[in-house]
């Protein structure tokens, strides 16, 4: 594994990923209907990184990232026309899809399947063993179901079946005021709640055009990176548990506990903190939090050294991880895989570098990449990412600017408590916000961020009311899971489990 | 005590041997053979042949028969034996069996009648049946048979390996035929019918390339791919 | 009724009066069983400490009643079996495992010369045969039937895979385990366990030193034989749920569970007998005889601790890695060790 020393400007990662990504987008048209939103976005980012400069921000809505967030779109038309066109196209497309689905169902109903099942595989069928793993299985990391066909101990085929944790969160969000959606979307990917909130808040902020104060951006970065560390720690523990190394789980959870304590200290909750607010963060960090955080930052690298001493030099771990579950960058991109999985295959594609949001371009960090994209690279990339996250948090903590932690826009953020006693206007704003919520101008926004598992994007469509017309999450777990069959086929069953663990799927995020 | 053990072991050996022959399910037949071998080792023990008794358990019960059970468990299922040939073959097998019984009967009865008045060896040396004694015999008196037998076993083992090597495991890039169903819809798109195996339960479909010819497998050509006004334009 | 076993069985060094033998049999059974909860608790406590947590500490003082609570809970659970399971085999399989595990326990000698207890000379072992080692292997071979039949009769695919793995693993590692001991046996010139200890006594040197390679191979192969990490593929919970015992619950599961811990104790005791000088205390020749059993138990505890330590540290191997390690590394190494030992012995 090697670490690519990217410069911290928008960049080299984006350029490296961009053209490949565009190419991948083209081929993905063939077989991945589920990633439509993500596709459009990929094309846009490619445009942006290769053609336009981040400063060419002409739409008059300064946004939080200093003009370099994906909403910086120089070719924006007037909102009304664009929305109308988009809606019309959407209707046409939906009709087309419905027709297709109807034809498919009709076809399906007419087929006599009993005649079809004979000759799928050339090898003797009697020697194949079909095992149904899950939805309740210790190694499927949630209620994932794997329909696995074995030949001896070798995987001939595996079909992931999802849907057992469907919670209808996206639909629920349509019935909530904008600021009430935050705790709902936080519960999708339950190990990346800050990221979920960030993606959603970012999208709504784009629609509203509010500017997030610098201090809030830094606090967001601190919490996001803490969350990334926490998520990777859970990943490390459970993955190694799947490999049979039981103790590392407890060590990883010990550090996770520290992080959760920090979360609790800053927001009152250990999980699903609802700390991020549209326009900033709910409140400033309490006194003494920075000291605690500093203690954690001092401790974490030594803990990571300990993990690596226990794992990276362990011959059995190396034997189990190296050259297992290999999938090259090209194929990964075709499947739409992003995040550590893609970086492990050598593509330095990190949205924090490519399209910096929330002041990520202020910090100096590297994007760890692997070489061949096996499980070992995935492991090493994630451990290295934890180190980089520590570095980012350190920089954010040192350079934490003074100032408000939430936007001053009273139409978006609640007025401070003391104003309620003196200002009638503040009272009205407060009343309006609490009872009805903010009204968001019509339009659509897609806000992608680099989650612990890959590109986590939130698409929000507003029809001008106080509730979102549509909220959709492009969850990295869901997209990454597509590549699982390709990774696992031909592996041993034990390696399939390790590969699944290294994929780091989060069923809450997959099923939503 | 000895007598009780002898009869217990003897009866168990005979019953288990009969079971091996008469049980139709091969798995049970093999298990019956295991019981038979265990009984035999008990009889060996009663004959002061402790070493042979234990080795019997170790080698036959512990290694050879485990493989039998293993193979039966893997391949088993067909409990009905294959059809038993023609009448001439059956007559032939009867003849062979009767000959065998007569021969063995003569041998057993002969020695048994001879020994009926004897009392067995009076003075058994303490080292009788010990590993040391057996080793000495194998390397002196029975050296040639011993070596010949081990050579034969070696040849058999190599032969088995050569025969077994012909069949290999899964090869990457193996040719697969694709069911017609795969062409109609991309499998793995997660319908519940597929999940429970009502459709396409057999392997291979997941990786099949979807050919656009049938129409159903392709996506509608979305022409707004290059434009950026479809979703984010209003910002 | 002077000697119940006056016949051929007396040749297996049965020299004691019949009532002593019966008392001994009961005692060994009782000790073997009561060691299990202790080891169970010890493992959980130790694992807890390795993982930075206290381990069980709610039931009884210092969590001492935890294993009893565990086993009690299991025993009072419903005895279910899957539909389609082969009934009598399903019931018999854990019994086979249990019997095979317990049957090896009497082979371990706990003292040298017979101790004088209430005026009777009693050897502190269940069975001191001149083929003791072979009996040990014979019973561990029978033990594999418990796993094989249990997995097969459950008619579950997970159990089936676990059982198949188990059978293959046990057969493979038994070969290495046996060959590793050839050096010890050749040096001693006997298969009797007490004579092996006596030999170490006379040499003034534990076999661990001259037979370090053999000791290593034996230890590793034993780990595989008793299904401990990193060779716990039989019940690899991450892929096979519970391996061969997936479908077992209640008392039958408890039987497997207890058998596993009896195996653990026997493995520790066997290793200390073969390589750590049994009851021999280094640099103290005139140790009183009553200390002997405690010395053996202490050494057993050390080995058990190491095994638990390994469990806390190492991940598990993959099936093919396990097989190739057994056949391509351990077995040739063991053969080489036996060869070198033979050459050295002849040369000396």
Image (cartoon, coloured by chain):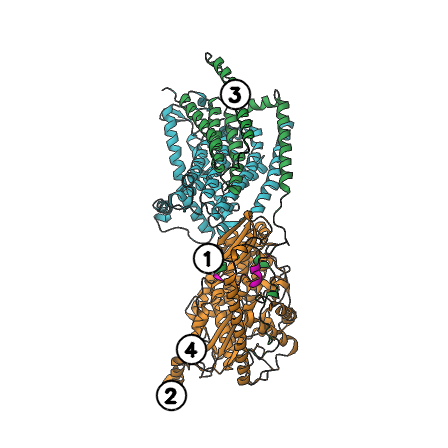
Element on which disc 3 rests: helix
The residue labelled by disc 1 is A135
Pick the quarter of the image with the N terminus of chain A: bottom right
| Residue extent of the magenta highlight | B178-192
Q: Residues within 10 Å of mark 4 (few under 14, many from 20)?
A: many
- Is B37 situated above or below A240? above
Q: Based on the displayed image, in which of its 4 quarters is residue A68 positioned? A: bottom right
**Which chain: cyan?**
C
Question: Which callout, 1 or 2, points to the residue nearer the camera?
Answer: 1
Q: Which residue is mark 4?
A: A177
- Report which quarter residue B216 is drawn in: bottom right
Drawing shade for chain B? green
Query: Disc 3, disc 1: CB below 8 Å?
Result: no
Q: CA distance from mark 1 to mark 2?
A: 56 Å
2 and 4 marks on the same chain: yes
- Disc 3 from disc 2: Cα separation: 115 Å
Q: Is residue A89 visible?
A: yes
Provide the secondary structure element on which disc 2 rests. helix
Q: Is residue B138 left or right of residue A412?
A: right
Question: Residue at the location (58% across, 83% down)?
Answer: A76
Q: Chain of mark 3?
A: B
């Amino acid at each position: 594994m090697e670490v690519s020393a990217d410069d911290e400007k928008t960049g080299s990662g984006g350029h490296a990923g961009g053209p490949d990504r565009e190419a991948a987008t083209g081929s993905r048209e063939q077989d991945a209907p589920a990633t439509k939103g993500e596709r459009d976005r990929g094309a846009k980012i490619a445009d942006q990184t290769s053609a336009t400069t981040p400063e060419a921000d002409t739409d008059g809505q300064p946004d939080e990232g200093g003009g370099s967030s994906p909403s910086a779109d120089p070719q924006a038309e007037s909102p009304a026309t664009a929305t109308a066109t988009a809606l019309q196209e959407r209707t046409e497309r939906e009709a087309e899809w419905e027709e297709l689905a109807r034809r498919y169902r009709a076809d399906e109903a007419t087929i006599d399947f009993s005649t079809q099942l004979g000759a799928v595989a050339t090898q003797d069928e009697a020697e194949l063993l079909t095992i149904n793993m899950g939805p309740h299985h210790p190694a499927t990391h949630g209620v994932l179901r794997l329909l696995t066909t074995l030949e001896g101990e070798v995987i001939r085929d595996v079909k992931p079946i999802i849907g057992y944790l469907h919670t209808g969160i996206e639909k629920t969000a349509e019935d909530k005021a904008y600021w009430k959606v935050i705790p709902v979307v936080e519960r999708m990917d339950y190990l990346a709640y800050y990221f979920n909130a960030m993606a959603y808040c970012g999208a709504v902020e784009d629609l509203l055009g509010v500017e997030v104060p610098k201090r809030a951006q830094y606090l967001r970065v601190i919490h996001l990176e803490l969350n990334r560390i926490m998520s990777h720690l859970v990943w490390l523990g459970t993955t190694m548990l799947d490999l049979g190394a039981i103790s590392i789980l407890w060590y990883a959870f010990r550090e996770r506990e520290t992080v959760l304590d920090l979360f609790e200290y800053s927001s009152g909750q250990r999980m699903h903190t609802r700390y991020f607010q549209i326009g900033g963060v709910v409140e400033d960090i309490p006194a003494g939090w920075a000291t605690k955080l500093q203690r954690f930052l001092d401790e974490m690298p030594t803990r990571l050294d300990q993990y690596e001493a226990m794992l990276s030099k362990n011959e059995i771990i190396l034997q189990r991880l190296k050259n297992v579950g290999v999938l090259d960058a090209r194929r990964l991109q075709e499947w739409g895989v992003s995040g550590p999985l893609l970086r492990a295959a050598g593509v330095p594609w990190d949205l924090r570098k490519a399209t910096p949001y929330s002041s990520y371009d202020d910090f100096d960090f590297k994007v760890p990449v692997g070489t061949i994209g096996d499980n070992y690279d995935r492991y090493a990339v994630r451990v290295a990412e934890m180190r980089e996250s520590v570095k980012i948090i350190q920089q954010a903590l040192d350079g934490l600017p003074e100032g408000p932690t939430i936007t001053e826009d009273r139409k978006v953020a609640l007025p401070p408590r003391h104003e309620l006693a003196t200002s009638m206007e503040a009272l009205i704003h407060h009343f309006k916000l609490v009872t009805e919520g903010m009204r968001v101008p019509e339009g659509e926004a897609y806000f992608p961020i680099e989650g612990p598992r890959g590109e986590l994007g939130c698409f929000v469509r507003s029809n001008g009311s106080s509730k979102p017309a549509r909220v959709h999450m492009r969850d990295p777990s869901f997209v990454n899971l597509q590549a699982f069959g390709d990774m696992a086929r031909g592996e041993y069953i034990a390696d399939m489990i390790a590969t699944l663990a290294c994929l780091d799927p989060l069923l809450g995020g997959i099923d939503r | 005590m000895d007598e009780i053990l002898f009869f217990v072991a003897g009866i168990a050996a005979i019953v288990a041997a009969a079971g091996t022959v008469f049980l139709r399910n091969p798995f049970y037949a093999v298990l019956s053979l295991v019981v038979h071998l265990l009984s035999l080792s008990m009889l060996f023990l009663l004959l002061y042949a402790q070493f042979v008794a234990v080795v019997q358990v170790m080698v036959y019960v512990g290694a050879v028969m485990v493989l039998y059970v293993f193979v039966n468990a893997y391949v088993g299922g067909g409990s009905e034996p294959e059809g038993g040939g023609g009448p001439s073959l059956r007559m032939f097998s009867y003849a062979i069996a009767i000959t065998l019984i007569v021969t063995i009967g003569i041998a057993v009865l002969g020695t048994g009648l001879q020994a009926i008045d004897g009392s067995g060896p009076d003075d058994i040396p303490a080292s009788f049946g010990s590993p040391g004694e057996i080793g000495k015999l194998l390397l002196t008196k029975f050296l040639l048979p011993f070596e010949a037998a081990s050579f034969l076993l070696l040849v058999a083992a190599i032969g088995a390996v050569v025969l077994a090597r012909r069949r290999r495991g899964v090869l990457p890039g193996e040719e697969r035929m694709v069911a017609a169903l795969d062409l109609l819809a991309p499998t793995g798109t997660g319908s519940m019918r597929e999940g429970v195996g009502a459709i396409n339960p057999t392997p291979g479909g997941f990786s099949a390339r979807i050919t656009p010819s049938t129409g159903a497998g392709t996506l509608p050509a979305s022409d707004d791919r290059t434009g950026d006004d479809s979703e984010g334009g209003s910002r | 009724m002077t000697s119940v076993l006056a016949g051929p069985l007396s040749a297996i060094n049965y020299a004691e009066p019949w009532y002593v033998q019966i008392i001994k049999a009961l005692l060994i059974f009782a000790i073997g069983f009561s060691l299990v909860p202790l080891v169970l608790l010890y493992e959980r406590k130790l694992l807890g400490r390795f993982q930075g947590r206290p381990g069980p500490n709610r039931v009884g003082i210092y969590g001492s009643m935890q294993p009893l609570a565990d086993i009690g809970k299991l025993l009072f659970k419903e005895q279910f079996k899957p539909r389609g399971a082969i009934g009598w085999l399903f019931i018999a399989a854990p019994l086979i495992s249990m019997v095979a595990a317990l049957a090896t326990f009497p082979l371990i000698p706990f003292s040298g010369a017979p101790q004088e207890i209430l005026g009777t000379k009693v050897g502190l072992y269940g069975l001191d045969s001149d083929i003791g080692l072979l009996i040990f292997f014979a019973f561990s071979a029978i033990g594999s039937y418990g796993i094989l039949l249990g997995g097969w009769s459950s008619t579950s695919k997970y159990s089936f895979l676990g059982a198949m793995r188990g059978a293959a693993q046990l057969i493979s590692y038994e070969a290495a385990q046996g060959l590793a001991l050839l050096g010890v046996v050749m040096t001693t010139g006997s298969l009797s366990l007490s004579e092996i200890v006596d030999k170490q006594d006379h040499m003034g040197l534990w076999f661990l030193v001259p037979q370090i390679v053999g000791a290593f191979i034996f230890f590793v192969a034993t780990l595989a034989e008793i299904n401990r990490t990193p060779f716990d593929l039989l019940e690899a919970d991450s892929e096979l749920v519970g391996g061969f015992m997936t479908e077992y619950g209640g008392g039958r599961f408890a039987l497997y569970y207890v058998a596993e811990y009896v195996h653990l104790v026997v493995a520790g005791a066997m290793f200390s007998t073969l390589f750590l000088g049994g009851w021999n205390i280094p640099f103290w020749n005139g140790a009183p005889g009553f200390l002997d059993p405690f010395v053996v138990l202490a050494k057993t505890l050390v080995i058990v601790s190491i095994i638990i330590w390994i469990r806390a540290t190492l991940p598990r191997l993959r099936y093919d890695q396990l097989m190739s390690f057994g056949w391509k590394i351990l077995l040739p190494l063991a053969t080489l060790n036996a060869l070198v030992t033979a050459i050295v012995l002849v040369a000396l």
